[in-house]
Amino acid sequence: METSETEREQQLRQLPVSAAVGLGGGIHRAPWAWVSSLWPCERRWQKMLNEANTEPVTLEAVLAKENLRVAWLAVKANDGAPGVDGMDIGHSAEHIREHWEKIEAKLLTGEYCPGAVRAVEIPKAGGGMRRLGIPNVLDRMIQQAIHQQLSQRWEVEFSEHSYGFRPGRSAHDAVRSAQRYINSGKTWVVDIDLKNFFDEVDHDKLMGWVARKVGDKRLLRLIGDYLRAPMQKADRSRERRSKGTPQGGPLSPILANIYLDPLDKELERRELSFVRYADDIAIFCSSERAAARVLASVSEWIEKHLKVKVSSEKSGSGPSDQSSLLGFRLYQDGRIGVAPRAIERMKTEVRKLWEARQSLTSKQMREQWQLYITGWWNYFELAQWRREVEDQSGWIRRHMRKCFWLRWKTPRGRLAALRRLGVKRRSLGMAYSGLGAWAIARHWVIHQALKNSTLNRYGFVLPWDFAHA
């Protein structure tokens, strides 16, 4: 990490999220990672979902006091940066209290105009940049209220094979389901990548499917207005949108699942074994020939019926242990491991976190390390084959030792630090060594000073050292 924050973390901190998930490097924030952190309000939210409602959704139901209260609690719990209006949670709360009657009246009469969304770009795990659209806090609350009502109608009909951004379901559930397919002998995997899915969603198709359960034209118009809300760039110029459902707002997850539900139903009709997590689709087959056939036919169906391109570069089929699913690798004997790309992203983050030129105290470095590595391990602890992770332990600790050596700065500072850490007599001469920091970090004197047990005692831990597969 350069100075106090990386550019990447600065971008990520703009998102209306506070949850950490383990799908990549850094803070591990997937698009819509904040959905996972709605569950401080889970009891209220789950209660609403359990109250199955087959009646068409109305704007009055969206604006009902209890529905809005739950929506506000979810938005408040997630916190997040302001939208284009510059108002944070606190200022937005004051604005809503003061002006809600007028806002509600405009919503009911169809005169309400959603604000533009603030464009934020973050790196994609596979390279390139992903653009998110961050709504104003007021619009996040209204979108969340709509999301809750739509979920009550659609959750009962969504596929059992769909796991992304759904209450009570997780990426781990998707991986375990995939493991069961492999254990049954379906060891060939078809990976389907929808090219720029969230930017290519056809508004007419989406609104047609939404209209099946939303009979209120005012609400349909409001949802359409949110889909078409302009994207404001950093230079304050605005870009009009006629397709796509930008990630970053509470409506995007449910709308994406509604759009892809026909695909789930088509795969079920074909009796295929599959898991879908948002736009990550993996289909499991028993032979190479079957996998090739499924890839061709499903890709054709998607492009014809969903009007979304399938990326020929990123889609393909092959043995399960040559593929990855949500950061995991599934071996043909059924074991779950960590995908090589996830290991590489973790190593990239280790280099940043143990960059010596940070204006942080040792306590702050410890806290940021624990925050990162605990979140990473909480996700990847699902892995049963952990050798790829455990093999990184020495390399990670070498980066820690290198960092401390550099932060001791001068021979005098290094001599004092080595003495404090119990190094004695001739070994103290290491303080005056001309070796480079990376070479010093593997020297036995530094290992004596910063033993694994010493690093652990001060909180610079590797959680897998204390875990059992």
Image (cartoon, helix red, strand yellow):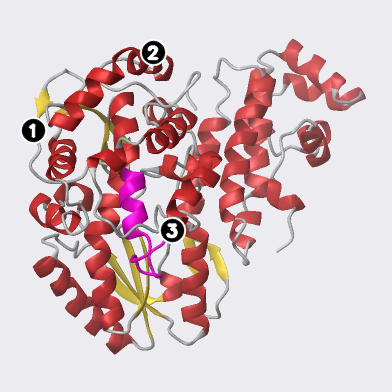
Distance between mark 3 and mark 1 Cα atoms: 32 Å
Q: Nearer the viewer, mark 3 or mark 1?
A: 1
Reading the image, the residue beneath label 1 is 240
Amino acid identity at mark 3: Leu
What amino acid type is highlighted by mark number 1?
Arg
Report whether residue 23 is seen: no
Callout 1: helix, strand or loop? loop
Q: Is residue 111 left or right of residue 430?
A: left
Q: Is residue 442 visible?
A: yes
Residue pointed to by mark 3: 326
Q: Residues within 10 Å of mark 1 (few under 14, many from 20)?
A: few
The image quarter in which residue 99 lies = top left
Question: SS class of the residue under badge 3?
Answer: loop
Q: Is there CB contact under 8 Å for labels 2 and 3? A: no
Residue at mark 2 to residue at mark 3: CA–CA distance: 40 Å
Q: Is residue 138 placed above or below 67 in the rendered structure?
A: above
Q: Is residue 153 magenta?
A: yes
Q: Which mark is residue 94?
A: 2
User: Sequence order check: which comes first, mark 2 or mark 3?
Assistant: 2
| Label 3 crowd (10 A; few <14 / some 14-19 / many >=20) | some
Where does residue 5 sit, x and y in percent of width and height? 47, 23
Q: Residue at x 27, y 43 (%)?
A: 128
> What span is colored magenta in the figure?
147-163
Residue 410 or residue 465, whichever sits in front: 465
Residue located 19% across and 54% down the image: 210
Whole-percent x, y for residue 50 in the image: 46, 56
Disc with the residue nearer the chain's start (3 vs 1): 1
